[in-house]
Image (spheres, grey):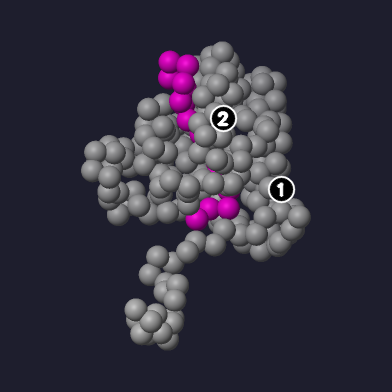
Amino acid sequence: MTTSTGRRRLAVVTAGVRQPSTSRLLADQLAAAVRDELAGLGGQLETTVIEVRDHAHEVVDNTLTGFPAPALKQALDAVAAADGLVAVSPVFNAAYSGLFKAFFDVLPEGALYDKPVLVGATGGTARHSLTLEHALRPMFAYLRAVVLPTAVFAGPEDWAGEKVGDQDADSSGQAGALRGRISRAGRELAAEMHRREPVRVADPFALTTDFEQLRMNSKRG
């Protein structure tokens, strides 16, 4: 097991459809927890936040044509190059949102292979928390990611005392419970990212064979 120090890259994908979004709020708090935990391990975090709603039309176009627009490609590349991923979706009809799923549908095959992923979800009732185990976790397992043990769901009662946009929620003990889950999940992802070597993204324009080898091969042919 390695415990390499240095900079790590975190991609944060959030598929909230409103502005402000509780999905974005949860994603930001998870990313902050990862940053703080990684700093305690002697590492630094570079975070890229991807609001899927900003790429909604490009995701649909990519689904139809098979080619991403430049802005979407940059977002997909950021996920592939990340050392860890935080993925948060709102829950609609007892499942992740179609926009969330569509984004990962256009991600290049193998981009999440062996990548540690922290999953989160938001919804209007605690019953939607089952989506984490019955929808999000299986999807990322199918994509061959390493889904961390702690998944975080936040319902309306969990935001008590938290600020969402310009609105302050009522106060209750639920907010403290949510913060505890966020801290535990952030600790798990930070530890997993810290113990691994940083992701190295291959340069698609790099030569895998030098010119001399190419010349020798052409002579043999």
Can residue 25 be seen?
Answer: no
Give yes or no for residue 83 being in the magenta stretch.
yes
156 over 120 or under it: above or below: above
Q: What segment is highlighted magenta in the picture?
A: 81-96
Can residue 96 be seen?
Answer: yes
Crowding around mark 1 (Cα neighbors within 10 Å: few <14, some 14 to 19, many 20+) is some
Q: Residue 113, how many percent across, how many down? A: 54, 46
* Quadrant holding the N terminus: bottom right
* Residue with the mark numbered 2: 137
- How many numbered markers are drawn? 2
Callout 1 amino acid: Ala
Crowding around mark 2 (Cα neighbors within 10 Å: few <14, some 14 to 19, many 20+) is many
Which tag, 1 or 2, sits closer to the chain's start? 2
Foreground residue, 176 or 139? Answer: 139
- What's the residue at 65%, 51% (across, down)? 193
- State the mark number for residue 191: 1
Give yes or no for residue 192 being in the magenta stretch.
no
Q: Residue 184, how many percent across, how many down? A: 71, 36
- Indicate left or right for 162 with 22 as reference: right
Callout 2 amino acid: Arg
Q: Residue 188, how many percent across, how many down? A: 70, 41
Residue at disc 2, secondary structure: helix
46 over 91 or under it: above or below: below
- Indicate left or right for 109 with 179 as reference: left
